[in-house]
Image: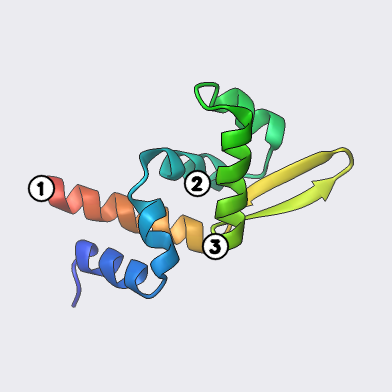
């Protein structure tokens, strides 16, 4: 039986490209935001006004490249959404943090 922290560590160790992302508060906020449903680039920009658009574009591209986000082209919009792995990552991080606070 593994505790929540061990599960998180095992999950990230099996996917090393997630490690640095899991340490970044802003990346995690972005993944969490995308986890609630597909968002257009414009909506992402509006949610994260403290980050330059080109930086957000790079972050979104990074998430797509490592498999934590995907994008679809709909009409004149590009929509980004969290992949199942992203949702698992967020869930495991939240559980591990909760355990550490106990």
User: Can you see residue 87?
Assistant: yes
Instruction: Name above or below for residue 43 compared with residue 68.
Output: above
Please tell me whether mark 1 or mark 2 is closer to you in this view: 2
The residue tagged with tag 3: helix, strand or loop? helix
Q: Residues within 10 Å of mark 1 (few under 14, many from 20)?
A: few
Q: Residues within 10 Å of mark 3 (few under 14, many from 20)?
A: some
Please tell me whether mark 3 or mark 2 is closer to you in this view: 3
Kindly give the residue lying farthest to the right in the view shown.
Answer: 75
- Rendered image quadrant of residue 8: bottom left
* Mark carried by residue 102: 1
The residue tagged with tag 2: helix, strand or loop? helix
Instruction: Name above or below for residue 65 compared with residue 41.
Output: below
Colour style of the rendered protein structure: rainbow
Q: Residues within 10 Å of mark 2 (few under 14, many from 20)?
A: many
* Mark carried by residue 31: 2
Please tell me whether mark 1 or mark 3 is closer to you in this view: 3
Question: To which residue does mark 3 refer?
Answer: 66
| Residue 88: x %, y % from top left | 43, 61
The residue tagged with tag 1: helix, strand or loop? loop
In contact (CB < 8 Å): disc 1 and disc 3: no
Q: Nearer the viewer, residue 20 or 12?
A: 20
In the rendered structure, the answer to whether residue 97 lies left or right of residue 74 reads left
Residue at x 23%, y 63% (from the top left corner): 4
| Residue 30: x %, y % from top left | 50, 40
Residue at x 10%, y 47% (from the top left corner): 102
In contact (CB < 8 Å): disc 3 and disc 2: no
Numbered label tally: 3
């Amino acid at each position: 039986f593994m505790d929540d922290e061990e599960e998180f560590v095992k999950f990230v160790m099996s996917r090393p490209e997630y490690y640095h992302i899991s340490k970044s508060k802003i990346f995690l906020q972005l993944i969490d935001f995308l986890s609630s449903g597909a968002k257009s680039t414009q909506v992402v920009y509006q949610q994260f006004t403290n980050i330059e658009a080109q930086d957000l574009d790079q972050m979104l591209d990074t998430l797509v490249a490592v498999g934590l986000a995907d994008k679809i082209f709909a009409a004149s919009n590009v929509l980004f959404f969290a992949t199942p792995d992203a949702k698992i990552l967020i869930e495991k991080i939240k559980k591990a943090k909760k355990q550490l606070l106990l």
